[in-house]
Amino acid sequence: MAQHFNICRGCFLAVVGFVFVSAVTAFAAEPAATVNSGPALPILAWEGVPALHATPERFKELADAGFTISFSGAPDNATVAKMLDAAETAGVKLYIHSPELQADPEGTARQFMSHPALGGYHLVDEPSAKLFGDLGAWTKRIQSVDAKHPVYINLLPTYGNPDLWGTPDFETYVQRFVAEVPTQQLSYDHYPIIRGGADASTDVLRPDFYQNLEICAAAARESNRPLWTFALLVAHTPYPIPTLAHLRLQAYSDLAYGTETLQYFTYWTPVSTIWNFHEAPINPEGKRTPTYDLVKAFNAELQAVRGVFVGSQVESVGHTGAAIPAGTKPFVAAAPIKSLQTEGTGVVASRLAKGNQRFLVLVNRDLHQPTTATVEFDGSTAMSAVAKDGTLQPLEGTTHSVTIEPGDVAIYAWQAE
């Protein structure tokens, strides 16, 4: 095989350009090595199956689309019990919320903590720092009874303001949360793709998307909490109906920064007099939309390469391109990567570690155009490429070029000494 070769765009769509390293010698008679194994990537459906539709069939439909967790509120604990029973039939975990969870958190925890389908307890969404003291006390009351199941609170993004955050700036908002509220994870939402441009008809990326990831990923590491992030599924002004490129850019960027649970807002289309929500996977009448098939296929794509991300730790994250996003750092090559060159907008370049495995994850930051990434290796270790189904394809030579479609990913990996 030549020292340097290109994968054309058509080949890339078939092979997809995921790239891994394997130190194992493959024999023709042996099954191909794969990263399509191990624990599933947790995928949460916000506004999952609603209480009024909480049947085994509806939870199976949610599971069939690749979701492992559902969250929807309930009017009372009697309804929570029925929702948990229905979720259990489909192997779905449920985050619960009810008036009794606030009025009697200890009693509610005792009632449900042994249920096989319980995922955790949802308290509030996007709170101001003014509520952190009360939320910390509420969290501790639940944890005094059930320290196993997470207490879940989701934070505001960087595109808020001091009145919303209750702090002078976003970093202080996040720092105060981890200091005052002992949740088992750090979750926040940021929906980066909006309609913009001169005529407000072009999908553009918010300039603070990666800055938000930098701040929250750092806070999660420093507080030793798993990072939970979002991708947007439901269209509403100024957010467009999602495309595959939209989902890829959000999810793969999140995973490159160390996300351990991927969340989608929303699965069931909410009814609102304020927001014109539409085209979530399930519409308000309970019918599937084209977004259902889109997210089902993409979730399967994610699970096929879950072995890269589940259980990995972020070693470093950098960016390429003439102009890198606010709050980020340029990519710096380190052995066995000798250099990385990209065209166009540039990529997110993240190094991950899991045991003696190491990965370099490249995410195309452009929503509209493919990019070509050329990686030069120092020749000290073997390299492999993996297809979308997770099978490994050994590489030869010290240079590899790959076309990465909009929002998509290429991944390199090697065995550490």
Image: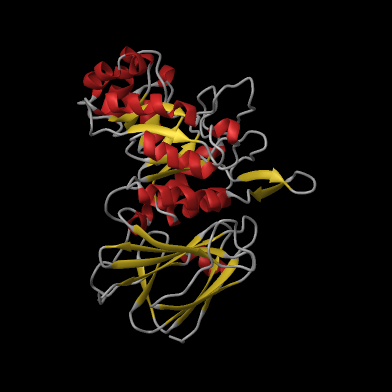
Colour style of the rendered protein structure: secondary structure
Is residue 414 or residue 145 the one in the foreground?
145
Q: Position of residue 154 (x, y in %)?
A: 44, 34
Is residue 63 or residue 371 the one in the foreground?
371
Residue drawn at point x = 61 percent, y = 58 percent:
366
Report the quarter where the C terminus lies. bottom left
Is residue 28 or residue 121 the one in the foreground?
121
Q: Position of residue 128 (x, y in %)?
A: 50, 30
- How many marks the image carries: the answer is 0
| Relative to 258, 24 lies left or right | left
Q: Position of residue 329 (x, y in %)?
A: 53, 63
Q: Where is residue 106 in the image (x, y as percent from the top left)?
A: 25, 19
Residue drawn at point x = 49 percent, y = 42 percent:
172
Is residue 42 at all visible to an observer of this figure? yes
Q: Residue furthest front?
A: 168
Looking at the image, residue 265 lies above or below residue 395: above
Is residue 63 at all visible to an observer of this figure? no
Q: Residue furthest bottom?
A: 2
| Relative to 288, 32 lies left or right | left
